[in-house]
Image: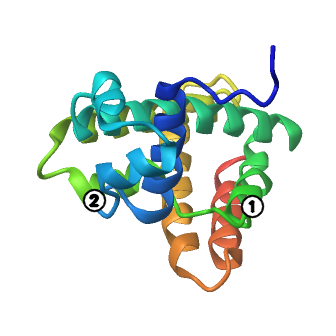
């Protein structure tokens, strides 16, 4: 197989949309730009994604899979316990392409016009919370504590988006994790 071959059209469209939607915003990114940057025709685009809504849902599904795989891996690299949340998120917050949570951003942009985006974001956050729960001891408070830590993670993500550096968000998250877990 030729290693220089382009990925299939659907994959090119999805990867292009992922990068543009995450970097520029969903509303700010028009279909024509996705088509141009992915190198497909309008006919090809609409064959794979009959509407921008279909592309948005595919983007969020792709982002969900990609981000959760990264999250699990990063937590494992940092010890696989609740205190791993801070160094794992520090990796992401300090990366050049960090633009916050794609799901929080999508809800902010689209919740009124596309309520299915809220449902998709809710499922993502439930799955994130389940990953956090796996870091905690099996006690009767595990689910509640995981939910609390998930809210703290979301708060840290939002704060890291608007502060000059991610350090205040990471310090606050470290304080919360230390206060709630052994």
Q: Earlier in the sequence, mark 2 or mark 1?
A: 2
Direction top: furthest residue: 1
The answer to whether mark 2 and mark 1 are in CB contact below 8 A is no
Kind of element beneath mark 1? helix
**Is residue 25 at least partly visible in the picture?**
yes
Q: Is residue 36 above or below residue 95?
A: above
Q: Report the residue at 20% width, 50% height from top.
A: 111
Q: Is residue 107 left or right of residue 141?
A: left
Quarter assignment of residue 47? top left
Q: Report the residue at 56% width, 23% height from top.
A: 8
The percent position of residue 120, horizontal first and vertical second, equals 33, 33
- Which of the two residues, 91 or 98, is positioned nearer the viewer here? 98
**Nearest-to-viewer mark from 2 and 1:** 2
The percent position of residue 58, horizontal first and vertical second, equals 39, 30
> Where residue 27 is drawn, which disc sits there?
2
> Where residue 90 is drawn, which disc sits there?
1
Q: Report the residue at 32% width, 64% height from top.
A: 28
Kind of element beneath mark 2? loop
Quarter assignment of residue 79? top right
**Is residue 182 at least partly visible in the picture?**
no
The percent position of residue 77, horizontal first and vertical second, equals 87, 39
């Amino acid at each position: 197989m030729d290693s220089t071959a382009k990925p299939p059209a659907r994959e090119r469209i999805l990867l292009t949309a992922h990068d543009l939607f995450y970097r520029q915003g969903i509303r700010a990114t028009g279909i024509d730009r996705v088509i141009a940057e992915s190198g497909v025709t309008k006919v090809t685009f609409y064959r794979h994604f009959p509407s921008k809504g279909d592309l948005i849902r595919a983007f969020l599904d792709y982002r969900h899979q990609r981000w959760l795989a990264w999250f699990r891996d990063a937590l494992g690299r940092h010890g696989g316990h609740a205190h791993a949340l801070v160094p794992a998120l520090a990796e992401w917050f300090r990366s050049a392409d960090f633009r916050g949570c794609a799901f929080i951003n999508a809800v902010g942009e689209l919740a009124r016009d596309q309520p299915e985006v809220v449902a998709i974001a809710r499922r993502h956050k439930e799955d994130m919370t389940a990953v956090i729960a796996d870091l905690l001891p099996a006690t009767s408070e595990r689910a509640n504590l995981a939910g609390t830590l998930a809210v703290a993670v979301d708060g840290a993500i939002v704060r890291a988006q608007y502060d000059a550096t991610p350090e205040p968000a990471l310090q606050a998250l470290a304080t919360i994790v230390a206060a709630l877990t052994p």
